[in-house]
Structure formats: C-alpha cells, structure tokens
Amino acid sequence: MTPGHEPTILVVDDDERNVRLVESMLKPNGYRILHAYDGQEALRRVDSDSPDLMVLDVMMPDLSGFELCGMLRARHATRLLPILMVTALHAMEDKVKGLELGADDFLTKPINRSELLAKVKALLRVKGLQDEIEARKLELEGKNRELLTIQRFKESMSQMVVHDLKNPLAGIMGNIQLMQMQRGQMPPGRQEELLIRSLESARQMARMIQNILEVAKLEEQKMPLRREPVTIQEVAAEQVADLMSLSARDGIRLDCDVPADLPPVDADRGLLSRILANLLSNAFKHTPSGGRVTVSARESEGSIAVRVQDTGEGIPADLLPYIFEKFVAGESEDRRRQSYDSGLGLTFCRLAVECHGGRIGVESRPGEGTTVTFHLPRHRAPAAVRAA
C-alpha cells in the first residue's frame, strides 16, 4: 500500500447483520468497506476491486470460508492477500485447518471491537511491507531486464558495426590486390574505376566512423555548433559533385534543384554537409540502376525545407515509424547494396537537424521511392543599429 492510501477491506459473510456489524467497527477508523454475501461474489469483488484485506466468515453455504481461502492462496494474484477468518468454532483443529489453508489470523465470535481493529491494523502493516518488497523486487527485475537488453543491444551493435565496416574495407583491399596482380597490364580506364570505387569505400567507412562518434556527442549535447549563414545551393552542389562518379558508375541520375537565390540558413556548415552526405548516400544505396535521386530546397514559413528524393525500393511500412532511431537498419533488396550505415546515418541526421532547432521527416512507399525532408531556420541578419 502506498502512503496516504485508504485501505480497502472486503467483509464476506452470508449473514447481512454480521457484515453490518463489522463495517460499523471498521468504517469510523478510515477503512473503505466492501461487502460480499457468498464465496463466488467474494471472488468477483477480489478481481474487480483488489482489496487490501479480507474479513472472511468460515461457515457459509456452497463455498465455505476454508474453501475460499484455499482458492485465493492457489492464485498468484491473491497469494499475499491478508485473510482474517471469523468463526464461531472453538476447536483447535478448525483453526489449524484454516492456518494450513493460508489464513493469516482468526477472530472468534462474538467479535471484540478492539481485537478486530488491532488484528486488522497488524495485518495491513504486514501487507504494506509485502507490497514494498514486491515493488522492490519488480524494480530489480526491471533493472536486470534493462541491463540484459542493453548488453544484448551492445553486442548486436558491435556485430553490426564491425560487419558494416568490413564491407567497404574488403572492397578497398580487393581493388588494391587486383591492381597489384595486374600491374602494368590493366587498362588505365579500369584502373581509374577501381580507384574511384576504393575512394568511395573509404569515404563510406569515414562517414560511418564519424556517425558513431558524433551521434554520441549529439545525444549528450557536447557538440558545439559553429553557426553561420550557409547557402544551401553551395553545400548541395558540393555533395552532388562528390557523387557524380558514383552516379555514372551505378547508372543513377543525380539532379540538384536548389535555387541560387534561396535565403541562407543559420547552421553549422560541416554538420549540414554531413546531413546531406548521409541522406544522399542512403538514397543511392536503395535506388537501382536507371533510377533517380534529387536534392532540392525551397523556402517554407520562415525556414528552408531541404528534400532528398529517390525512386528506389522504398521503406517497409513497419519500419517507417522507427527509421530515425539508433541501429534501425533496413536491408536492400539488392544484396550488393548495404543497409542504412549500421542504422546510425539517419539517427545522426535527426539529431543534427534537431540541435539546429529544425525538424526532419520521411515519406515512403515500397516500390515507389522515399523522400526525406528536413527544415532548418533561415538566417536572420541582426537589425541595423540606429544612429544616436
């Protein structure tokens, strides 16, 4: 029982006069009294009202107090419910039977008011301690489950990160070994292609490592922002230029539709570049050859809305609500393409946008493509100082 809780006592007796008598003794002392006039009704009241204590008459038709006590003790939910049995029987064997079935104490009729109040108070005190122990037990179990979940999460995270870092590393090593094996025999065009692939794999690794480090800093709010007026068109053009070779290699059309006269945003230029890099990287990974990736931006109600849109495979509906959470990775249908950067790329984007005071969202339909849109505040020049 919690402090300030009004204890609820269920009085069970087939004689209404006895119920009223017990109620008249208990109610003036701050107890909430419930009634039941047979065993089946008592079971229903226990399930619906969860009383803190039961005052139970032994001699009842159909279902005796002994039988009801045994049934309550056999149920997990009521195994700790204090039961004070009331009987006109004086035989010791009857009291022993009641105690063996789980009764906590006995009162003998006619009921003495002082004895009733003293035993009720004692049993409720024990009930309070039991409730506290149960609460602590549940709390410890919850913490243990949480620790186990965290441990499993860390293990799966480590496996995922190691796995995803191995892929671009294997590509770099394979390209270098191929160039070594065919030294002097490889056509210049082929050599240039392998170098481009190696550079892209190295950039992917660097981006993944940077995401891991910066997600932790952003979550702990330990990454200082170097805000300045940033032109979206310049940043977008830089990212598009970096991906042109990848666009040609994979047969994916890459378009940039950002007006040069768009007002600047108030942002950390480095973070903004990495947001676009992550979004464009994801778009390329999940867009097949012959598809299209477009980065665009427009002014929208005091902010600048930047959109990265692809015509790829889309995101499954069950994954969509969680796509910006840590380590939520979506697999590509094309197994040559990797998952969402160990599930950290989009998390980084969300945290980086939010730390600017912006917002980010995603729209996607499987088989039709995905659009990620983020809003950043416009840069507002300080008001001119009036001449004195």
Image (spheres, helix red, strand yellow):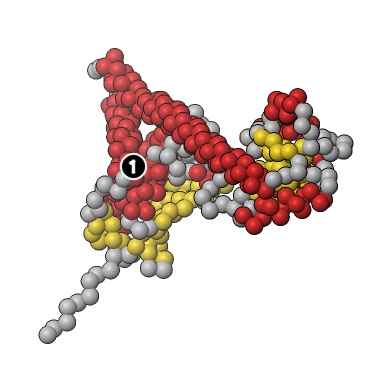
Percent from the top left, x then y, of residue 133?
Answer: 51, 35
Percent from the top left, x then y, of residue 124?
Answer: 59, 42
Residue visible at 72% across and 52% down in the picture? 23
Q: Which residue is mark 1?
A: 215
Q: Nearer the viewer, residue 193 or 385?
A: 385
Residue visible at 24% across and 51% down in the picture? 224
With 163 as the anchor, is 145 left or right in this view?
right
- Which residue lies most toward the right here? 62
In which image quadrant can residue 155 be found?
top left
Looking at the image, can residue 232 be seen? Answer: yes
Element type at mark 1:
helix
Number of labels in the image equals 1
- Which residue lies most toward the bottom here? 388
Q: Which quadrant of the figure contains the N terminus?
A: top right
Percent from the top left, x then y, of residue 218?
Answer: 32, 46
With 248 as the anchor, is 222 left or right in this view?
left
Percent from the top left, x then y, of residue 225?
Answer: 25, 53
Q: Which quadrant of the figure contains the C terminus?
A: bottom left
Looking at the image, can residue 282 be seen? Answer: no
Residue visible at 79% across and 44% down in the picture? 13
Residue visible at 28% across and 68% down in the picture? 380
Identify which amino acid the numbered label 1 is placed on.
Val
